[in-house]
Image (tube, rainbow, N blue to C red):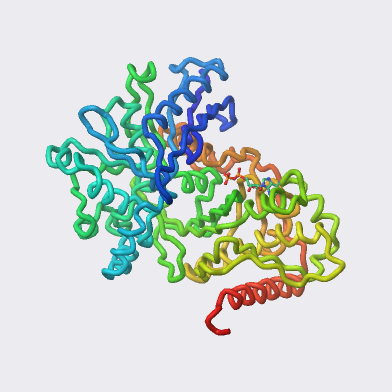
Amino acid sequence: MKKFIAAVDQGTTSSRVIIFDELGDMISSHSKEFKQYFPKPGYVLHDAEEIWDSVKLCFDKALKKAQLDVKDITAIGITNQRETTVMWDKKTSKPIYKAIVWQSSQTQEISNELIEAGYQDIFKKKTGLLINPYFSGTKIKWLFDNIKEASNLAKNNNLAFGTIDSWLIWKFTNGKNHITDFSNASRTLIYNIYDLTWDDELLDILNIPKNILPKIVSSSGVNAYTDKEVIGAEIPISGIAGDQQAALFGQTCFDKGEAKNTYGTGCFLLMNTGKTPKLSDSGLLTTIAWSIDEKIEYAIEGSIFVAGSAVQWLRDGLNIVKKASETEDLASKTNSNLGVYFVPAFVGLGTPYWIEEARGSFFGLTRGVTKNHIARATLEAIAYQTKDVINLMEKETGIELKSLKVDGGASQNNFLMQFQADILNNNIKRPKISETTALGACYLAGLGIGLWNKQNLVKMWKIDKEFNPNMKQKERDSLYRNWQRALRACVEFANKENY
Ligand code: ADP
């Protein structure tokens, strides 16, 4: 009998369920958007019940499209938007407030207070993260500070905290399992990535009681079974991971030095750093990649604020293209960049500069510059920023980049990918299945029931296109030096005090 795996990919704007077969091929998929709530400036909330409903609907529809019965599903893998925080009453399974989304800055004040009180170092040393509203810790504190029933429920042992994976598993199992995996736990700001425990000292600082926290389980392995009454069968849930870590797994970056970059609105870069966590001094995050067979592997993570969104700006702001993909044609018509560099610092400069006041700038414009060069400079900027982060990763971890796998909307741009390979002087591989997050959840789940081993997965992973570097070192050095000049000039422009 054929075996099928359902991957639940619970994202920030939509939920998706993809059914894979035992060869790791996609059989069917269904996705559903859900509502975003913005009740006050800076607040971003989701309704956890709506999220569950969307997942359940996608699950049913994906089965239907595949013409499968729920009993045909051998295992379920779950991957999720990370850090988003839900708290619910264990007796009624009702959330006590909306889910506070990772993007929500409603805990900026709490974060500032913690930083002012001098706690940045201790949080960083223990969790690999920075005190920032993104991470769950300050969101949990906010819920205790603002939602009256939280404390009482906790006192009576009736309150549960979870990231979205925990919440979905609670619902799938009809309240039998309150668990999360190591990769999700490592994004909460209360989890010690060295001792592998919820950290008492950090919990004390944030005033969070331990009895609300989920049990931590491995990312791959049978950790729970769905409830028959909920979805019609008892199916093992055997894969759990946060979305970026799942994508790293779905790209089979199993070895130290293997990395993936997701080229979306921004970029998310993760590099596998092996068995030891590597701390960064310049804003990269240290995180748990996954735990398999009781063994933890770590990753280092960097993000780029503006990537695909710069291409969107060419489309919607400048009207140079009608579709983002047209930039490939425009850029391919040029023989060189004609000395044009674009620093797309629309919202400031991130890693490793951290200059909020910086703004986007073009350099090197002459009369010969056409929209083709503007498109080229925009795509090149995405590749330069990626190189900046990878250089930093190599420098701070002492681990050399072995290979780069790519995904996300803008990875479809062949000009960008070739330039990325050229400027990095490294091979780039783009997979056939671009849904690497769901694929990772599927791989973890299949591995967790013993359907595959890691070697099988490396073979199953199918390549769409490989890009090999084809640029002289001299040219590479000169381009990258000029990019760095442009960056410095952009920083200088942000620096009003000197003038
Ligand atoms: P997200 O998940 O962040 O919404 P996606 O992975 O869907 O992002 O990618 C969409 C982004 O990628 C958009 O910002 C878009 O401008 C850009 N993009 C999509 N296709 C291309 C392309 N062929 N070339 C360049 N950029 C592209």
Which corner quadrant holds the C terminus?
A: bottom right
Query: Given the current orientation, which residue lies at the most extreme bottom position?
Result: 498
Rendered location of residue 92, percent (x, y): 23, 27
Q: Nearer the viewer, residue 80 or 361?
A: 361
| Above or below 460: residue 406 | below
Q: Residue at x 36, y 50 (%)?
A: 295
Q: Residue at x 77, y 62 (%)?
A: 470
| Above or below 447: residue 399 | below
Which quarter of the picture shows residue 259? bottom right
Which quarter of the picture shows residue 471? bottom right
Q: Nearer the viewer, residue 51 or 40?
A: 40
Rendered location of residue 469, percent (x, y): 73, 60
Rendered location of residue 198, percent (x, y): 25, 52
Q: Residue at x 33, y 59 (%)?
A: 109
Relative to 426, 23 lies left or right: left
Relative to 163, 260 lies left or right: right
Relative to 149, 170 lies left or right: right
Relative to 345, 362 lies left or right: right
Rendered location of residue 300, percent (x, y): 46, 59
Q: Residue at x 18, y 48 (%)?
A: 209
